[in-house]
Amino acid sequence: MDRFFLSDVHLFPEPECHPGRETFISFLDYLHDSFDPGELWILGDLFDFWFEYRTVVPSGYERCISSIRKLTDKGWVFHFIPGNHDFWVGKHFVESTGAIIHPDEYLILDLNGKKVLLSHGDGLGPGDIGYKLMKPVLRSTISKFLFYLLHPDLGTFLARYFSDTSKRILRRDLDRIPSGTQKWINEKFDEGIDIIITGHTHLDTLIRTDESTYVSLGDWLTRFTYFHMRDGAEADELLEYSSNSPECRE
């Protein structure tokens, strides 16, 4: 079986410019046309913001959702670990895509005799105290209810204003894993985990030793990288997807 892992697409609603939307859709079509049904794992922040009101859902994502649905209709299994930008995915997202949602901070699987840990990657390890204090508040039932009280247009505007992903990405270009995250990763390896795959940092890197493998997935704003695991393969690969699809560049 083929398993594909990616994260941090940070889709903006169409027709707003996005530097990787067409490449992402092309990649989904590539999976559909080139492989037998396998598993697609998106480890958070597929959307720059997503919130489902009871009778209103975000618009402008129809093409991407349709491309994912085409995969699941063919027999692919789509797994989604919510990130810090789209932790409010709900019933409409599941019904539209066929997604299996994994809401916990991390998930451990047994794949081909290996213990594999998957996580979006936000708030792992020591440090970042402010975010860790805010995280349970933002994800609480009370916060969700209060957000329901806002008009959808106002709620989306406020969320996008505070997210401001495109500017944040330009300001922050990591060349190494944050020290707190690295400490957490090392502890998990000491506990017997064989492979750890995370997103969130937008850094694409693969660190392999004789005992363990760590993968940071990169993003689909500037890097367009994914991790490919294939049953029976000697080594799994972190790859960059290239497409001839024209992109909107701001």
Image (cartoon, helix red, strand yellow):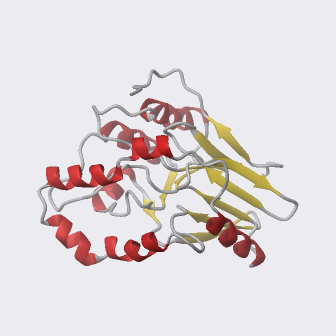
Q: Which image quarter is the C terminus in?
A: top left
How many labels sit on residues?
A: 0
Q: Residue at x 73, y 50 (%)?
A: 206
Q: Could you tell whether 197 is left or right of 156 in the image?
A: right
Q: Is residue 230 visible?
A: no
Could you say which quadrant of the image residue 107 lies in?
Answer: bottom right
Q: Which x, y percent locates residue 186?
A: 73, 70
Q: Could you tell whether 84 is left or right of 213 in the image?
A: left
Q: Residue at x 34, y 41 (%)?
A: 12
Front position in the image: 130 or 9: 130
Front position in the image: 159 or 94: 159
Q: Which x, y percent locates residue 21?
A: 42, 34
Q: Could you tell whether 197 is left or right of 209 in the image?
A: left
Front position in the image: 142 or 132: 132
As drawn, which residue projects farthest toward the right? 210
Front position in the image: 31 or 117: 117
Whether residue 213 is situated above or below residue 202 in the rendered picture: below
Q: Which x, y percent locates residue 76?
A: 52, 49
Q: Residue at x 38, y 63 (%)?
A: 87
Whether residue 30 is situated above or below residue 92 in the rendered picture: above
Q: Residue at x 47, y 67 (%)?
A: 102
Q: Is residue 193 visible?
A: yes
